[in-house]
Image (tube, rainbow, N blue to C red):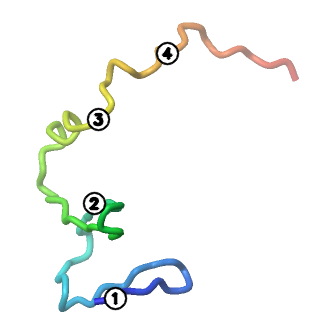
Amino acid sequence: MILTLDAKRRLTIPATLAPTSPGDYFDAQFDGEEDAIIFRRINPKRDWLAVLKECPIPMDDLPQRRGEFPRRRKL
């Protein structure tokens, strides 16, 4: 099946090909070797803590917060 973009750069997939309901979430990834976009349905009842643990950036790498209060500007 060949899909084309509409004027607003959206893809429209026929409902018979992928039955969905409003509120479904999908993960879209581009595969450079296949030159294709892969859509995977995300389970809505998934544990958010497990998703956070799969994050590729560890929480230790976040920059430290400034300890000083914001300065008041003189108007």
x and y, in percent, of residue 54 in the image: 20, 38
- The amino acid marked with disc number 4 is Arg
**Image quadrant containing the C terminus:** top right
Specify which label sits upstream in the sequence, 1 or 3.
1
Specify which label sits upstream in the sequence, 3 or 2.
2
Who's the residue at 53% across and 8% down the image?
Answer: 67
Rendering quarter of residue 42: bottom left
**Does residue 30 sit above or below 5 in this rendering?**
above
Q: Secondary structure at mark 2?
A: strand
- The amino acid marked with disc number 2 is Asp
- The amino acid marked with disc number 1 is Ile
1 and 3 marks in contact (CB < 8 Å): no
**Image quadrant containing the N terminus:** bottom left
Kindly identify which residue carries mark 2.
27
x and y, in percent, of residue 17 in the image: 19, 87
Kindly identify which residue carries mark 4.
65
Kindly identify which residue carries mark 3.
56
x and y, in percent, of residue 57 in the image: 33, 31
Rendering quarter of residue 40: bottom left
Who's the residue at 23% across and 37% down the image?
Answer: 52
